[in-house]
Amino acid sequence: MSYIYILAGENLELAEAELNGFLESQEIDEKASRRKNLAETEAEPMQLKRLGLTHEVSRKISEASKPEKLDANIDFSGSFAVRAENLTEEEKDTKKIEKELGRKIESEKNSVDLENPKKTFKAYLFEEKIVLSELVQDIDRGLFMKRKNDRRPFSSPVSLDPVLARVLVNLSGVRPGKHLLDPFCGTGGILIEAGLCGVGVHGRDIDEEMIEGAGENLENYGIINYDIERCEISEVSGLEKFDAIVTDLPYGQASKKTSNVVEDFLEVVESFEGEVVFMYNEASIGGYEADYSVYVHKNLTRYIFTV
């Protein structure tokens, strides 16, 4: 039995990469196979709520060329609903398919309840096939909104979006119980997302106000075991303690707080043996080429590097 993931449509390549990093964090070697915004794995991972660019996850039941050919002999008791999702550019009668599959699934043990079903079955429609699955995790991306910059006790005009911060953490593949360093932690956005995933968090920043504010933010979200210190990137020590470095490199006015900040960071990267994921405002830096781009607005595109 395999798992189905419906990826967020705004950046499918990045969403697929995040999913694969997430699988690595669950000690799963498999890479997801993707078609459009539907990805599939044979593995059944834990921590599904950790994903940032996935809308929902379901357990595959069967697939066929037509709804009437689907194996929908599912033995369970309770209420259920069927939701069809058209993944094509063709017009499809989703309501008709939902009713047809509802009749196939319905038995003496269960009944249809469209308002508050105990189980939800998803029918994903392609041009030449239909995939039936049972929803196991509806990922509420609204929870990320509650951790946005203006919702935190301490905020700064320059702060990473929580969804993007979670994506960076997942791209690193860092596992629960392992240790992540953000050497430019700012208000702690990356550290918050990593801490909520069960990762040990370590932050460094040159600004004392940021250090104090990041600690306040972490504690506000229940992350009480953290290590944050004030220091420049050139002063960071004990790299062997960390399994991943994940950061949003300072740029523009922020980068003028210390000299040669980018060059010093790249020297740290060269000597570090773990996974490195960082974001910058240029597509090429110090011999590294960006793996992904993120459109912010017409005057700003951010670039993600995985080393």
Image: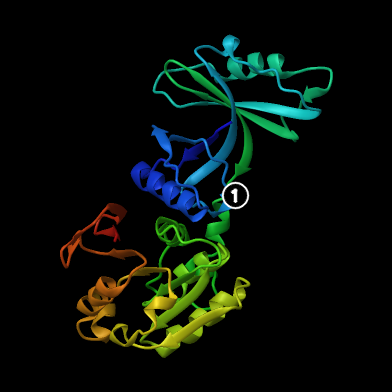
Q: Residues within 10 Å of mark 1 (few under 14, many from 20)?
A: few
Q: Is residue 166 left or right of residue 218?
A: left
Whole-percent x, y for residue 210 in the image: 43, 83
Q: Amino acid at mark 1?
A: Met
The number of callouts visible is 1
Residue placed at 47% from the left, 77% from the top?
Answer: 202
- Nearest to the observer: residue 173 or residue 52: 173
Q: Is residue 271 left or right of residue 24?
A: left
- Frontmost residue, 3 versus 168: 3
Q: In the image, residue 84 lies at what x, y percent?
A: 57, 25
Q: Name which residue lies at 37% across and 42% down.
A: 12
* 275 over 233 or under it: above or below: above
Q: Is residue 80 visible?
A: yes
- The residue lying toward the viewer, choosing from 237 and 231, is 237
Q: Quadrant of the C terminus?
A: bottom left
Q: How is the image coloured?
A: rainbow
- Image quarter where the N terminus lies is top right
Which residue corresponds to mark 1? 46
Q: Quadrant of residue 97?
A: top right
Task: Say if 239 sits above or below 298 in the image.
Answer: below
- Residue at 59 percent across and 49 percent down: it is 46
In what element is the residue under mark 1? loop
Give the x, y percent position of residue 121. 64, 28
The x and y percentages for residue 179 are 48, 71
Q: Is residue 185 visible?
A: no
Q: Residue at x 50, y 82 (%)?
A: 227
Residue 121 against residue 279 in the figure, above or below: above
